[in-house]
Image: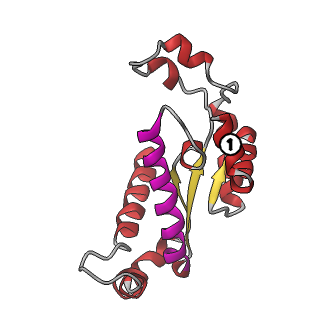
């Protein structure tokens, strides 16, 4: 079952990669080229295609700038691909969890501060993985372009969109 799922995900990823024009097309013509090149091949991939980003891809995340940059890129890629792939029924989503109890904090290598200090700085109790998974499925069922998983994430993202200066002040 897992191998079938992995093959399906790999096939979907390869098809979505073809949406990015590789023939030097000018900006603005990518959608037309993608429609001609891969349109018929994408229709069988209809449904959600989630990409894992992070809350760090939506709000300022001092101290983890490189990580935040990559997660901002995942969000940008996802919302752009969503617009291009929609005509084929493919629903690309950026999944942005906040603090998740995965053990990543304990397993990470810390350089400028101690592991204990870093873990103490986590402003919210990390949520269990099974609760996060339920929230992700709910967001995909609602077909949200950006699925912000945790309550603190939704509040932080909303405040940043409305009043960015306040979030920068707290950062």
Residue 107 falls in which quadrant of the image?
A: top left
Q: Is residue 133 shown left or right of residue 116?
A: right
Question: Farthest residue in the left direction?
Answer: 23
Q: Residue at x 50, y 75 (%)?
A: 85
Which residues, given as a range, are shown in magenta? 64-86
Q: Residue at x 48, y 74 (%)?
A: 44
Q: Relative to 116, say whether 86 is above or below.
A: below
Give the x, y percent position of residue 144: 67, 61
Q: Relative to 39, say whether 73 is above or below.
A: above
Q: Relative to 116, say whether 88 is above or below.
A: below
Whether the magenta-drawn stretch holds residue 75 is answered as: yes
**Looking at the rendering, in which quadrant would you find the C terminus?**
top right
Residue 9 falls in which quadrant of the image?
A: bottom left
Q: Is residue 71 shown left or right of residue 26?
A: right
Give the x, y percent position of residue 167: 68, 42
Q: Residue at x 70, y 36 (%)?
A: 131
Q: Is residue 41 visible?
A: yes
Q: Is residue 1 visible?
A: no
Depth check, front residue: 128 or 2: 128
Instruction: State whether the magenta stretch is mostly helix, strand or loop.
Output: helix
Q: How is the image coloured?
A: secondary structure
Q: Residue at x 67, y 64 (%)?
A: 143
Disc 1 target residue: 167
Answer few, some or many: residues within 10 Å of disc 1's Cα (few below 14, many 20 plus, some between 14 and 19): some
Give the x, y percent position of residue 115: 49, 14
Whether the magenta-drawn stretch holds residue 61 is answered as: no
């Amino acid at each position: 079952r897992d191998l079938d799922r992995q093959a399906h995900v790999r096939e979907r990823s390869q098809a979505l990669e073809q949406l990015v024009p590789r023939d030097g097309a000018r900006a603005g013509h990518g959608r037309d080229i993608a429609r001609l090149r891969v349109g018929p091949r994408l229709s069988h991939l209809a449904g959600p295609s989630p990409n894992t980003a992070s809350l760090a891809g939506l709000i300022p995340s001092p101290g983890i700038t490189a990580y935040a940059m990559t997660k901002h890129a995942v969000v940008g890629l996802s919302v752009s691909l969503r617009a291009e792939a929609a005509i084929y029924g493919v629903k690309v989503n950026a999944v942005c969890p906040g603090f998740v109890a995965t053990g990543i904090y304990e397993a990470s290598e810390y350089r400028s501060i101690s592991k204990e200090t870093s873990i103490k700085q986590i402003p919210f109790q990390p949520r269990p993985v099974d609760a996060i998974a339920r929230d992700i499925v709910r967001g995909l069922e609602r077909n949200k372009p950006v699925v912000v998983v945790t309550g603190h994430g939704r509040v932080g993202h909303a405040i940043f969109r409305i009043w960015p200066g306040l979030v920068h002040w707290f950062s």
